Image (spheres, helix red, strand yellow):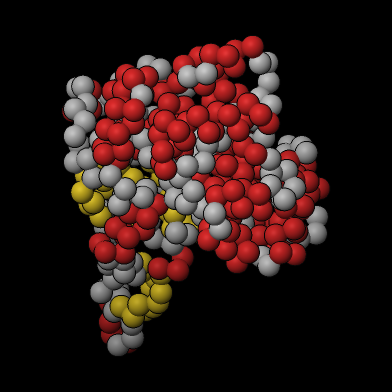
Amino acid sequence: MSKVLQIIKIACPKSELRLNITLQCGQSFRWREVKPGSGEWRGVVANRVWTLSQDETHLFCQPHASSEDSRPVRKTSKNTKWKKSGKSVATLQPELDISQEKVEAIFRNYFQLDICLMKLYTAWAEADDNFASVSQKFPGIRMLNQNPVENLFSFICSSNNNIQRISMMVEHLCEMYGSPVATVEGKMWYSFPTIPVLAGAGVEDALRTKGFGYRAKFIHKTAQMIMEKGGEAWLHSLRSLPYPECRSQLMTLHGVGAKVSDCICLMSMGHLEAIPVDTHVFQIAARDYLPHLRTYKTVTDKVYLEIGKHFRTIFGDYAGWAHSVLFSADLKKFKALKSLDSCAKKVKYV
């Protein structure tokens, strides 16, 4: 008998994960709120479409059936004609065999839930008065552990761009070069393209027609360079390198500068001390931490390295996570956002 789509419940308080900020603060560009204000978020993880939501104490994960879940099931028709003939009809029914354990493993890895965020917030608040003040209204902001292929090419799209336009470009990439995953409420969701596909002939020209501009060349050329280095296996192998070496290797790719490289290190390579410095982070640093930087008009290489070193000195091995909290709290889109329910109360760090 086929199984129906189930909702998997994972114990996770909002102080450890706050979906509406974590999924909207510019780490990933494929999550969509199902309806404005619904608190339900839909996206693709582990080649499956999911709808996520939460209450004060739990994360709810609903998998959506894909074409791979459907298989012919012999079922006797209720039609009298078929009954008399003694025949049965083959129908497609979703055979969704996905356990609690498997779902928990997927999202404990994706949200890095084995890392206790409250302990980190406590340490950061003790180390920095500014963080202690800012973080009270912004608990539960975590770093995602993303697939490096999707993360890399998504951030190549981020060059001189805004989140809305980056999201549109990533969507185009998936529609043009990904594979269908599932149709949910009339919308087809696609997998992220593979590196060999993005390295193929005609990709640059096709992306330019979709408004990618110079990023089209970056995407195509980087895919070709990765293939020459050993393909996706080479990219995954960078996780085993120390942070400086991983960062340097990524910066050999076309269109990957210091900021994009640090994004990949932080969000895909396990280097949680990496600090991506863009104009926004520079402004936070100059305003709240390094006032002498106010005389600079641009982020020079020297300034970039100084900001990263300063944040690592304050926040330690998870400095990239702390920086993301400060970054998110300073975004205009979150200015009016109130901490929800119990999170609205002043957080007492333990």
What percent of the width, then of the height, locates residue 49?
Answer: 43, 53
Identify which residue, 78 or 280, lies in the foreground. 280
The C terminus sits in image quarter: top left
Identify which residue, 137 or 349, lies in the foreground. 349
In this picture, is 334 found above or below 319? above
What percent of the width, then of the height, locates residue 99?
Answer: 27, 65
In this picture, is 279 found above or below 78? above
In this picture, is 6 found above or below 302? below
In screen coordinates, is 18 left or right of 311? left
Residue in view at x 66 percent, y 49 percent: 248
Residue in view at x 66 percent, y 16 percent: 296
**Does the rendering let one see residue 34?**
no
In screen coordinates, is 226 left or right of 217? left
Residue in view at x 22 percent, y 40 percent: 13
The N terminus sits in image quarter: bottom left
What percent of the width, then of the height, locates residue 169?
Answer: 63, 40
Residue in view at x 75 percent, y 58 percent: 225
| Residue found at the far bottom of this picture | 86
What percent of the width, then of the height, locates residue 156?
Answer: 66, 42
